[in-house]
Image (cartoon, rainbow, N blue to C red):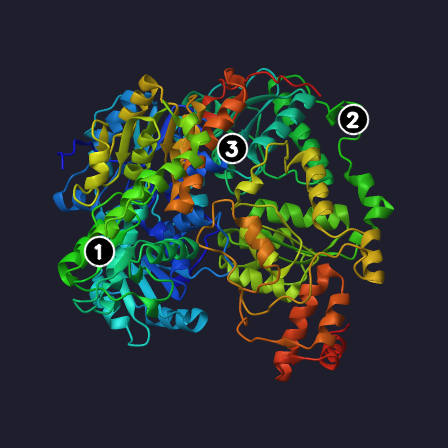
Amino acid sequence: MPPAQIIREDGAYHSFCGLTCVGWLYQKIKDSFFLILGTHTCAHLLQNALGVMIFARPRFGVALLEETDLSKQQPELATMINEIRAEHKPSVIFLLSSCTPEVMKVEFEGLAQKLSRPELPVLFVPASGLDYTFSQAEDSVLQALIPFCPLAPADDKRVVFLGSINDTIADDFALEAAQLDLPVGGFLPASRFAELPAIGPGTILAPVQPYLAKVANRLARERGATVLSSLFPFGPDGTRAFWEDLAMAFGKQVDLSEREARAWSRIEAHVELLRGKKVFFTADNLMELPLARFLRHAGCEIVECSSTYINKRFHGRELAALEGVRVVEQPNFDRQLRDIAELQPDIVISALATTNPLIGQGVVAKWSTEFAFMPIHGWAGIGTLAGMFTKSLRRHSQLDALADPVWTAGLMPSTIPLQVRRPTITG
Amino acid sequence: MRLAYWMYQGTAHHGVGRIANSMRGVHAVFHAPQGDDYVNPIFTMLERTPSFPQMTTSVVSGRDLAQGTIRLPETLQQIEAKLHPELMIVCASCSTILLQEDLQTISNSARTQAEVLVYDANPYRMQEILASEGLLNVLVKRYAQAQPLTPQPSVNVLGPASLGFHVRSDLMCLRRMMATLGVTINVVAPWGAALDDLRRLPAAWVNIAPYRELGQGAARQLQAEFGTPVIYEAPIGVQPTLRWLNRLVELLNEVGAQIDGPPVKLPPLTDFSLDGLSAPSGVPWFARTADMESFSGKQAFVYGDATHTVGTVKFLRDELAMEIAGAGTYLEHEADWMREQLEGYVPEDLLVTDEFQQVAKRIEALMPNLVCGTQMERHSCRKLDVPVMVIAPPTHIEDHLLAYRPQLGFDGADVLADTVYLTATLGLEKHLIDMFGDAGLEYADGPSDSALQAPVSAEATVDAEPMVVAAAPTAMALDDDVIQFVWVPEAQAMLKKVPFFVRGRVQRNTERFAREQGHTTITTELLLSAKESLGG
């Protein structure tokens, strides 16, 4: 493996807090409840990050620390747990930490243990915005589940897919594995707490999400499982490599080159539009490496691929496929802005906070967050994946150039002209 | 400690960001974990800002805490080099405030040209509204300078700020009205104001501060220090706007008399219309048309901030002749003022709570014909099948539309009346439906599954809301949704004959009645006795 050239800068701050992972995990694990020990800030964050997705009955809430709680050594959560148990009847409660209790040095492990009952375990999940961004906290949630995965015997050689994907994609993956005659041990996470897969020394862990390095390492260390080293299953190239390598882990040589070629030809119209386009990833959802690799194989020029967190081993194959590309961990956003102005990329994939302002500077920009919520995995997701990039390009090319600044006049209070002295509209 | 699902107000640092983002040459710096940067996309997404919001998170990471690294001075220097603000406002977050650092000394060590103000917004003692109001007070106190009044009649508009409810439209409306009066706007603050603008605030003859939530503290201060008279009322509705205009003219002329300035006269009211020829508002005539007859019996529940809740209650009753079933607010510190304002308007005590479940329960108990609320009441009402319109923050992207939709002034009265009209069920049409069942408008089919549905799949995207709502028209999320009722086919058929827009309510009431009577099977007999006992 060639040594990956990763530039490290001083910090990406435009991304979401790790707590936002509850937005998809509570839906994925259908009998769970996510309880965040936090403040008004955490509740406001969740409301704004997830408020656009309205659920009949959210199975997450915030145990709100108020001023009087700050002086207490250990927060009293038993009543609240009972309330949640009565109202939501979960099989498992995840207790997530946040910045304030971490500064207060709340002893979470002990707290969770004390609240745990055999029939309703309470699992501590470190997820605070001090240490975790966005999708990264899923890693913590999955680690908390490890003790509840039964131990598989050593001769039980099966694949366990690692990372939350929706049930339809999961079905696709199970079906695909069956067609390749690969025995499936299950999914981590499973849709229900009681259905967690058995993991042991014979388990092949196949990561389907690129932000789960720590749980993969722990399962390798603690259970002797083998972590599949491959590309992540995004795009024709990634999906082919993923399945071929997975089959190889079971001692089967399969050749999916034709299937890959068919997949490329199915998205030819997209690829045609992508070819030669300059793409810039500013870092947000930790999916940047595989997405950039797919675009590179589709003929794009990746002018920068930044991510908030890169693990040289876990992301090794992706990094190798990006050799020669500028890869940055924890990028400095001001430097990125200067580079975007200079390099003039055709499309920038950026965080929610920065996308509209980038478009305001005349750049075609797209929300990176969307990729975290779209079915873009495996063979079935290829069209959706390619379409997400070309949709932006097409839409912007279809519209007139926004050359005259008059069309954004008045939107940004700080940029409106100096305060008018004389009324300009007469009645 | 309590279990919270939803917040009506943002945090203190969000309030600080709203002020900084409103102003020219001002930048907010949050000494906070990276996660606290979530306030930034609220601006870029809801206001769709074409520039970067004027706020930066100076990141504090777990490693920084362990190593004692403080990046704040460096962040201040970077912002200065890049943006050259006149003023940087530093505030701590809910976690970093516990570290009890001396942020002023730390900030001073950056030795920036720009002034650095450390604003002590304790997030455990104040939320968005008190923090923004408090900060505006600090800024006005700090910068306003004694000076002669403008030679021409003039006003300041205090209170419009970034992410304010329909704030740009309100401001356009106020500008239009001032232009019609021939009154100059001296300064609008904080929206679009530079520090220099704050300095010349005392040059205005009168201050307009229509929002209880922001700007009135600054107005009081300017009155105390410089003697500028204030008009505090919010001109919501036609008659309040007329009274407001008359009062404004009176105040301006009082000031004018002292300095020998030109008098201000209220022009013919048609001058306030868009073409200068028409009624300034369509509401007074509209309310008297036969079409609106059916509104007289309609009951509304109004919940929100202080300004819009009080304004809307009065408008609905005084100008549309509706009945008020109840009102409430999440602003506890405004409860007394609101009770006083709504004396005689609201049949029951004001609901004061910031727990959305309480509000939803009250709405469910009242089952009004119209709810005016916030984004959260929109969700609750969709579950309850009650017509709802949003009149106060917090908002959803759906409330950030392009057209001119003020809440204030004559134009605002038209907007409110139109929204009520489109939201509530209509008159003649309603009688037809009541009389003859579905009137061809059928689209919902059969009783819905009263057990909770799980309508959202894992691939829910950011614009999933309408889909979700369509999937669960009567799914009750609030309570008692665990019992599975069985409707016998005959009862089902009867229920189907109930007009579709009240069917959900009839179904729920019947099921509640059944539960009280200890039944889980709903027969025609049970449906009839439920109807009887609930008064038809």
**Which quadrant of the rendered structure holds the C terminus of chain A?**
top right
Q: Mark 1 packing: few (<14 Cα in 10 Å), some, or many (20+)?
A: some
Q: Chain of mark 3?
A: B
Q: Residue furthest right?
A: B290
Element assignment for label 2: helix
Q: Which label belongs to residue A1? A: none
Q: Are the numbered discs 2 and 3 placed on the same chain, yes or no? A: yes
Q: Position of residue A161 (x, y in %)?
A: 29, 56
> Circle 3 sits on which residue?
B223
Left or right placement of residue A139 versus residue B500 in this view: left
Q: Chain of mark 1?
A: A
Element assignment for label 1: loop
Task: Say if B218 sits above or below A121 in the image.
Answer: above
Q: Of B52 and A335, which appears nearest the observer?
A: A335
Task: Say if B273 sits above or below B240 in the image.
Answer: above
Q: How many marks?
A: 3
Query: Residue drawn 28% across and 72% down?
Result: A116
Task: Say if A199 sits above or below A291 in the image.
Answer: below
Q: Amino acid at mark 2?
A: Thr
Mark in front: 2 vs 3? 2
Q: Which label belongs to residue B270? A: 2
Q: Earlier in the sequence, mark 2 or mark 3?
A: 3
Q: Position of residue B192 (x, y in %)?
A: 48, 25
> Circle 1 sits on which residue?
A250
Q: Of B249 and A65, which appears nearest the observer?
A: A65
Mark in front: 3 vs 1? 1
Q: Amino acid at mark 1?
A: Phe
Viewer can see residue B71: no
Q: CA distance from mark 1 to mark 2?
A: 83 Å
